[in-house]
Amino acid sequence: MWSDAAVTAHIGGEPLSEEDCWARFLRYVGHWSLLGFGFWLAEEKETSKFAGEMGFADYKRGLPALKGTPEIGWALASHAHGKGYATEAVRAVIAWGDEHLPSPRTACIIAPENLASIRVATKCGYRESERTTYKGNPTLVFSREANREGISHLGN
């Protein structure tokens, strides 16, 4: 998936090598091991075909708006674009995060031209909170506060 230019167009801009894809995968495992959260792999229900990745991370990007805030992210294989999978998956990730993350606030960064991801973020309760630059590129920061009524076991 990460070697597909259609996937990386708004996420770094360049397809990844096999080595970089492997490093990304290992980073996901490390998040779960060290922080208790990370990314999941998704598949299409009908075909069991790999559909994408989504979850929470702390990438230490050096952006003040993200410091100490779990960052939600999602990416779908190009064959899964435009089918509503991202919204469904992000809502499931948010539900997990609202129950399990110690921080009630989560955030994401999106390239301003990535209208599909902006739509997913806003449908899932994220609101633009800042305009900045990341790695020299214009970047939008979206944030969301969890609704934690009735959740009493946070941080466990």
Image (cartoon, helix red, strand yellow):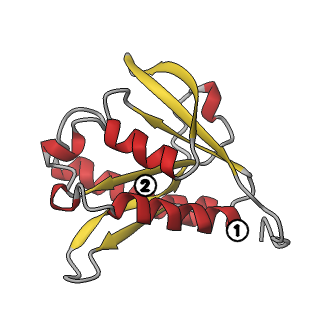
Secondary structure beneath label 1: helix
Residue 148 as seen in the image, left or right of residue 32: right
In the rendered image, the vertical position of residue 129 relative to residue 116, given as above or below: above
Secondary structure beneath label 2: helix
In the rendered image, the vertical position of residue 2 relative to residue 136, given as above or below: below
Q: Which of marks 1 and 2 precedes in the sequence? A: 2
Q: Quadrant of the C terminus?
A: bottom right
Image location (x, y in percent) of residue 83: 26, 62
Residue occupying the point 26% across, 67% down: 51
- Judging by the rendered image, the residue that carries numbered circle 2 is 27
Residue 140 as seen in the image, left or right of residue 114: right
In the rendered image, the vertical position of residue 46 relative to residue 106, given as above or below: below
Image location (x, y in percent) of residue 152: 85, 72
**Residue kind at label 1, given as amino acid type:** Glu
Quadrant in the picture for residue 95: bottom right
- Judging by the rendered image, the residue that carries numbered circle 1 is 99
Image location (x, y in percent) of residue 144: 64, 45
**Residue kind at label 2, given as amino acid type:** Arg
- Mark 1 Cα within 10 Å, few/some/many (few <14, many 20+)? some
Image location (x, y in percent) of residue 97: 63, 62
- Mark 2 Cα within 10 Å, few/some/many (few <14, many 20+)? some
Residue occupying the point 14% across, 42% down: 5
Residue occupying the point 29% across, 34% down: 12
